[in-house]
Amino acid sequence: MRRTPELSPADGLTRLAGYPFHIVTWVDDAGYPVSAAVGASMDVAGGSASFATPAGLVIPVDREVSLTGSHIRPQPGYGYDERRHVTVWGRASVAPDGAVTFTAAHAWGWDEQETPFFEYSERSVGQSRKYFDALSSERGTPVKPRLSLPFLALRATRLPFLTATIVPVVVGIAIAASHGRFDLVTAALTVIGAAFTQLGLNVANDVFDTTQGADDANVTPTQFSGGSRVIQYGLVSLRSMAAIAAVCYLAAATIGLILLAIAPSVELLVIGIVGIVVSLGYTAPPLRFVYRGLGEVAVALGFGPLMLLGAYVVQTHGALAWEPFVASVPIALLVALILYVNEIPDRRGDARAGKRTLPVRFPQRVIITGYRIAAALAFAVVIVGVVAGWLPIPALLVLLTIPLALQVSRGLAPNYDNPYGLMAVMGVNIKLHLYAGVLLFAAYLIVLVLGAVAPSVPVFVSVIG
Amino acid sequence: MRPLPEQASQLLDAALVGELTVVRPDGRPVTYPLIPLRDGDRVYMTSSTLFSKKLEHIAANPRVSLSITDPVAVGGAAGRLTIQGDARVIAEDPHGGWERLLPIWEAKEPAIVAFLKVRVALPLFFERALIEIVPRRVLLWPDGDTSVAPQVSELVEEAA
């Protein structure tokens, strides 16, 4: 993959015409490049440029000459922006009066307004690999890019995304506590076990997306999408990532078995097995849910009912109830919407890799409408749940996050084709899930406090009726 | 070796960007915009491994030039220059060896320190090599006007 895009000679000349001056460059007879500023006039249709020979210099006619335009805008106290440059190569002919006619043959250039720096960097990852390979070969020992261990762990496991697990698990524990069932040790083990499941999923996702070509095909990853990239960047090997995923799943399974020993129930066993299958099957063959457009369903199921009910049944030793299930639905919808929006910038690379996600399958209009319907449904479930007496009245606090959903909804269309513009929208969408979960958790804390200090105060609509 | 002309040093210190030209194996000059970092009479630049093709060219042919041409990039200071010199790539420690030039870089691009603190976001950008240029010859246009012949300073005595 070429880093600096090749341009046609005409495109190169057209771009050069936009620069206030140009730099003519050639290699002198001693083998050193020489450059001087000139003011060239472009004849795009004729494929040429003309300018005066800089005084005291001799422009050669027997070798290639280049014309370069380079631009930055200084930003005092920061640095600069608006980086762009273009170079056109060709041959020069020089008239007796020193007038130069330059005939364009090749061109290349980069404009960060056309190709954002992050994408430009991503397209250049192969060159970095080549550099380290050459350095390793020269030194006879592997030389790899490096990150400090905390940063590497953060990046490889995508640790900040653990909110997707912590939200449903703590809400499930809080609901169980509101039902009079709470044990600190099993609650802590549940959080840790669920976290290991997600870390295993995150790392396994990178492994399988690499082996199936999806991460390599993606040249517009962002902070929230496109995987951790640690394999692509050469920071961690595929084999090591596979081992890390296996260790995480092993830790999750071990904690699951401990929980089963402490609080045995068929319900927990079933939830645990289904959870591991959904987690592994998310990207791993043969299930590959996300490659079949079922990623949202898998994520909703895994980070909604399975996590929340799993945490609940640990506390209740297998007793199920409608309340935790209803509470899991808005969380499930909002977490699925994180994936849904994060797939938008990945859709071109995903399509190339045969990853048929929903944004790959459906046009922008359908995807944005789908977001609005699913987000509205999440809030509708809360309202209906409260009115029907399934959820406590304080759960209506979740509705405070509606402005965030509106912000995401409004931000999708203008940034649909701009992965880096969409980053801010993805950030708000993640906050939407987190804040909604925190408010639902707060609702159950209110229920618990009221139950302790004012048990006669009704917290369910059905109780009022 | 003679020192750089005073105005050349001033332009190098002021420039937010200069144009490094290297020579490809087929003889074609290739120009890359980079931040020039002067340390005494040597000029340094750093290149991310992401954009390391220029390093391959320098390793194969150390003859390079660095020009400062853009009045905007030097804060409106008068003058233009081209330095011809011999370059070498310093790649002993791509992870942090280049950071010795960070104070000079930061003076020109203060934001770089903030970016470095979140190295995790763009790790390969901060895997870098240093390019060291020993200037041999300076072409200086004191008023920036290239319709007037440049002042030429030979910094290296040719062997007899």
Image (tube, coloured by chain):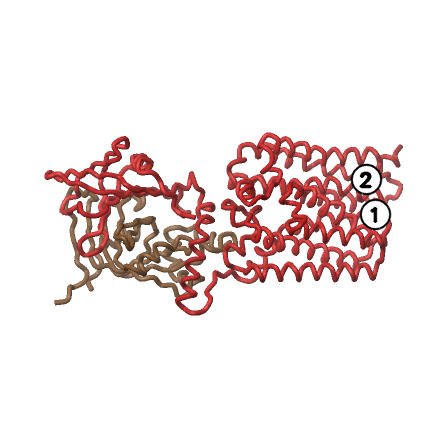
Chain colours: A red, B brown
**Which residue is painted at 33% across and 38% down in the image?**
A8
Tell me the element at label 1.
helix
B46 sits left or right of A184 in the view: left
Residue annotated with mark 1: A178
Nearest the viewer among A396 and A29 is: A29
Tell me the element at label 2.
loop
A236 sits left or right of A254 in the view: left
Q: Amino acid type of disc 1?
A: Ser
- Whether residue A115 can be seen here: yes
Q: Quadrant of residue A450?
A: top right
Residue A442 in picture, x, y percent from top left: 75, 45
Looking at the rendering, in which quadrant would you find the C terminus of chain A? Answer: top right
Nearest the viewer among A301 and A355 is: A355
Mark carried by residue A392: 2
Same chain, labels 1 and 2: yes
- Whether residue B72 can be seen here: no
A152 sits left or right of B106 in the view: right
Q: Amino acid type of disc 2?
A: Pro
Nearest the viewer among A238 and A267 is: A238
Looking at this rendering, what residue extends furthest in the left direction? A96
